[in-house]
Image: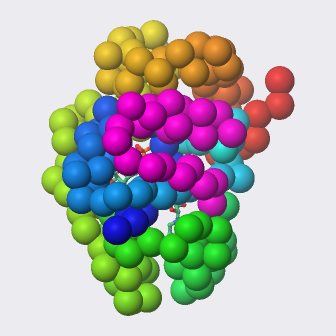
Amino acid sequence: MRGFYIGRYQPFHDGHRHMVEEIAADVDELVLGIGSAGDSHTTRNPFTAGERVMMVTKAVEDLDVTTYVVPIEDLDRNSVWVGHVQSMTPRFDVAYSNNPLVVRLFEEAGVEVRGSPMFRRDVLEGTELRERMIHGRDWEALVPETVVDVIEEIDGVERIRRIAETDANSETPFDA
Ligand SMILES: Nc1ncnc2c1ncn2[C@@H]1O[C@H](COP(=O)(O)OP(=O)(O)OP(=O)(O)O)[C@@H](O)[C@H]1O
Ligand SMILES: NC(=O)c1ccc[n+]([C@@H]2O[C@H](COP(=O)(O)O)[C@@H](O)[C@H]2O)c1
């Protein structure tokens, strides 16, 4: 059986890793969708699709499940989004998500959806991690070590801080 799990992964953190471990117990193969793939250089979406491909690939490579990492750009039309996802991914049998819109769109399209309880959501949340990076608080303990390495390689903390300085409203593209 093949599963599908999408997130923005800005960045990929231990909550995502926990969910992937649970999914891996269910499936033979896993498709990990990098959502909002066209977005980067904003405080909400600081990392590019390519940078997130590196984070996600390295964060799951020790697991005993074949994984395909596929970037997926957003569409203006929710009603055809599931078809868009399916057009970009290997065929899958079940979608995993805790995002209510994603759950609804897959269910309406007749795809089985499974969720899981949130894991340490008080700290394991992308928004919280990005805030910690901006304000110099500890974030490294909340993501897989391989993700720390990628963020260091791309100088990601410096980027987020620069964006936060120049972009108080968070969605304006970064231009240095
Ligand atoms: N701590 C967690 N435990 C379990 N699932 C999680 C956790 N955090 C996020 N998820 C789920 O992972 C998927 C992808 O989440 P996403 O990439 O938006 O992360 P996020 O932490 O919610 O980020 P942000 O705060 O940037 O929106 C969603 O289905 C989300 O509900
Ligand atoms: N119309 C669309 O493009 C559409 C609809 C639902 C979800 N999505 C994307 O799927 C991803 C869902 O991930 P999260 O659970 O991390 O929000 C996001 O990147 C979101 O933008 C896109």
Residue 1 visible to an observer of this rendering? yes
Instruction: Farthest residue to the right: give it.
Output: 176
State which quarter of the image contains the N terminus: bottom left
- Look at the image and give the residue range highlighted in magenta: 50-72
Q: Is residue 142 above or below residue 21?
A: above
Q: Is residue 59 magenta?
A: yes
Residue 97 visible to an observer of this rendering? no
Is 80 on the left-hand or right-hand side of 14?
right
Instruction: Determine the residue positioned at 57% across, 75% down.
Output: 86
In which quarter of the view is residue 61 placed? top left
State which quarter of the image contains the C terminus: top right
Query: Total number of numbered labels?
Result: 0
The image position of residue 89, as x and y in percent, is 58, 67
In which quarter of the view is residue 80 placed? bottom right
The image position of residue 126, as x and y in percent, is 41, 37
The image position of residue 119, as x and y in percent, is 19, 42
Q: Is residue 66 magenta?
A: yes
